Amino acid sequence: MSNIIWYIIAYLVGGIPFGYLIAKYAAGINIKEHGSGNIGATNVLRVLKQKDPKKAKKLAALTLFLDAFKGAAVVLAAKFAGVCDATLWTLAVLAVIGHCFSPFLKFEGGKGVATTAGVLLVLVPKAVLVALVVWYLMAKYVRISSLSSLTAIIVGIASTYILYPNLSIQSHAPLWIIAFIVIYKHKENIYRLVTGQEKRVV
Ligand code: G3P
């Protein structure tokens, strides 16, 4: 299959707005109009828990899983199909772009954290595991979702360079593009964090 087809698939699959769909069809809520307006698992939990905390937890976990899974699935499928390393990294970027600028939501979308975890799990799994531990500890003890995500992204990048010293030259730019997109999508969160207004997920 030509690389162009893989690029389109990565962007479209990455663009599936699972949080939006889950909130809409499982709870009848337009998640973009509530809470932070994000379509990610945190906002699904934040908004839906007002109705049914137990169900909200399950739906948030499902959102998190599916957002990560779609990224991993695309890169993994391409890897099994024999696509070269440089193209796999491009697919990773496109899946994250798809999630953050979804063609199914008028090019709006999420903040890319779970999808980044999914694509990188296939490419640099050890670094993702370190980032996940950091994310979990931050989420558990600091309980600010955006700060957990941003810390995990930074730790993930640092771990990639430490744990994969022979990383192919083609992977550096994609890695930084992904980090830039995720950080850029958190710009409002960063403003709230700096000004002490970012709320904890209780
Ligand atoms: O992964 C998303 C998280 O970092 C921030 O989400 O809804 O608190 O803006 P939210």
Image (tube, rainbow, N blue to C red):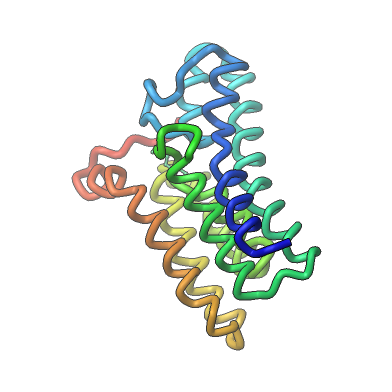
| Nearest to the observer: residue 163 or residue 121 | 121
Quadrant of image for the C terminus: top left
Does residue 121 lie above or below 113 as drawn? below
**In the figure, is residue 29 to the left or right of 163?**
left
> Residue extending furthest bottom?
166
Quarter of the image holding residue 36? top left
139 on left or right of 58: left
Counting from the top left corner in percent of width and height, residue 180 is at 38, 61
Count every numbered label the image shows and give the total. 0
Query: Is 25 drawn above or below residue 6 in the view shown?
Result: above
x 43%, y 62%: residue: 179
* Residue at 53% across, 35% down: 41
Whole-percent x, y for residue 11 in the image? 55, 50
Q: Quadrant of the N terminus?
A: bottom right
Residue extending farthest right: 80
In the image, 192: left or right of 180?
left
Extreme residue in the left direction: 195
| Front-most of residues 50 and 94 | 94
Q: Is residue 156 left or right of residue 128?
A: left
Where is residue 156 drawn, in percent x and y?
52, 66
- Residue in view at x 58 percent, y 68 percent: 89
Q: Quadrant of ligand 1?
A: top left
Give the residue displayed 57% in from the left and 14% down from the top: 27
